[in-house]
Amino acid sequence: MAIFILRAFFLALLGIVGFFYHPAKFEAIGPNGSLVGAALMVCLGALVILIERVIRGSQFRTIWGATIATFFGVIIADILIYSINLLDIRPETASFFRVFFMLVLPYTGFIVGSKKAEWFDPVTLFTFFKERSVGRSYKILDTSVIIDGRIADICETGFIEGTMVVPQFVLKELQQVADSSDSQKRARGRRGLDILHKIQKMADVSVQISELDFPDVREVDLKLIELGKHLDAKLVTNDFNLNKVAQLRGVKVLNINELANALKPVVLPGEAMKVFILKEGKEPNQGVAYLDDGTMVVVDNAKRFIGKNLDIAVTSVLQTTAGKMIFGRFADSDEDYRRRPAPAHSSEDRGAARS
């Protein structure tokens, strides 16, 4: 209500100013010259209010893009007008082109800047003018890797350099998850927000919130890929499908799961290890154990040792896209083991490794 009263007062004030202070030419109209001046000022005030309402309903990136593009349009128009003045052409033709360029180019810049505001985003401009000179790089964080949380530990160790870019649409998705009615989703969303806050507090890590968006693209994964192209940045994720699609679209990816698999200890067939048999395996007489890093160990002839520590010998290692799976054996004697068939790497085992 207050804004409407302020606008009405603004229009009334302009009307009074136009009534008493108007160009002398308006007096030639007659006694109504003051009214014409007041009406003209009120119309101009209404135009200002209309522009103000449009600006209030627009995002900052749209206003920024329209302003920068209009400025560029004016500069280009001045350059062309200066070039026309150097040419030996008729004054009427020169005047036509001067007016044409001064009207068309700023208008074109305004339209293009408001519709393609992402082209003039400060992050993008910084990339073009600063990125290569200072040797920095951008890493775009997606929702899954933020919720996962391991990215904070990696940043803390200093193994990732450059600026961590968090798009605004990723923050929006995190907030939606944190506000979910499902308790598990709500906990994951809040964990993601806490992880971001933790990364921002790190002294050696630069975090930048990007307002760059792509209204024509609906899916968040595709928005991330487009943002990676615009910023020439690497995408940090642990989403398998996003990883593959981004690579197909020419965007470099840092996959946290692949990094974790690469850092797991190398185990060779024949090595001995001590494991805790946790549960029964899929095949008869098998036991299942897990290493500290979550790697699944399937042990033949170990069902009766569930709930106990056991020394085993590694027989084979199965590497999958989802991780590593180790097969081992425990036998009462070498002769007993030779009589037993080799453990089968069944489809259930592979499915368990993926889980």
Image (cartoon, grey):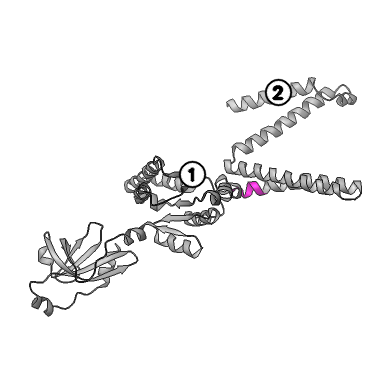
Image quarter of residue 18: top right
Residue for badge 2: 12
> In this orientation, which residue lies closer to the viewer: 325 or 271?
271
Upstream in sequence: badge 1 or badge 2: 2
Secondary structure at numbered mark 1: strand
Residue 31, given in percent of the width and then of the height, sits at: 87, 21
Looking at the image, residue 199 sits to the left or right of residue 313; the answer is right
Specify whether residue 214 is in view. no
Residue for badge 1: 209
Q: Which residues are magenta?
A: 112-117
Crowd class of label 2 (few under 14; some 14 to 19; many from 20; radius 10 Å): some
Where the C terminus falls, by quadrant? bottom left
Looking at the image, residue 26 sits to the left or right of residue 164; the answer is right
Crowd class of label 1 (few under 14; some 14 to 19; many from 20; radius 10 Å): some
Residue 293, given in percent of the width and then of the height, sits at: 26, 57
Q: What residue type is disc 2 on?
A: Ala
Where the N terminus falls, by quadrant? top right
Q: What residue type is disc 1 on?
A: Ile
> In this orientation, which residue lies closer to the viewer: 126 or 51?
126
Residue occupying image coordinates x 70% and y 26%: 11
Looking at the image, residue 307 sits to the left or right of residue 188; the answer is left
Specify whether residue 27 is in view. yes
Magenta segment includes 7: no
Residue 130, given in percent of the width and then of the height, sits at: 56, 47
> Which secondary structure is most common in the magenta stretch?
helix
Image quarter of residue 23: top right
Residue 241, given in percent of the width and then of the height, sits at: 42, 62
Q: Residue furthest bottom?
A: 339
Q: Residue furthest right?
A: 90
